[in-house]
Image (cartoon, rainbow, N blue to C red):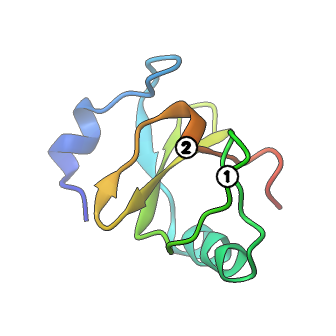
Amino acid sequence: MIADHLIEILRCPQDRSQLHLADAELVAKLNRAIAAGELKSVAGETFEKPLDGGLIRAAGDLLYPIIDEIPVMLPDEAVDLRTFQ
């Protein structure tokens, strides 16, 4: 997983806010949606690989996925948590 010191320096590329790790329950829920072919990125692309985790920006509305232990910090690849439930 991502080292704590790296999380402290990473910022949301859109609003420069701090990020925090998504909890295991949310990651599991997202991975169930991926398995069902239902999870889409902001750009509308369907996720194919399960997430190792996620980084949520301070507002709590966007999650940047961690795939193959690499944080994907591209706004179009993020998950809009406001539309995911």
Left of 78 or right of it: where is 13? Answer: left
Q: Quadrant of residue 18?
A: top left
Secondary structure beneath label 1: loop
- Badge 1 is on which residue? 45
Label pair 1/2, CB-CB below 8 angstroms: yes
The tag earlier along the polypeptide, 1 or 2, is 1
In the image, what residue occupies the spot 80% across and 44% down?
Answer: 82
Left of 68 or right of it: where is 27? Answer: right
Q: x, y (%) of residue 35? A: 66, 82
In the image, what residue occupies the spot 59% across and 35% down?
Answer: 76
Left of 8 or right of it: where is 14? Answer: right
Is 57 placed above or below 65 here? above
Indicate the amino acid at tag 1. Answer: Glu
Query: Which corner quadrant holds the C terminus?
Result: bottom right
Q: x, y (%) of residue 37? A: 74, 74
- Badge 2 is on which residue? 77
Alpha carbons under labels 1 and 2: distance apart: 8 Å
In the image, what residue occupies the spot 52% across and 36% down?
Answer: 57
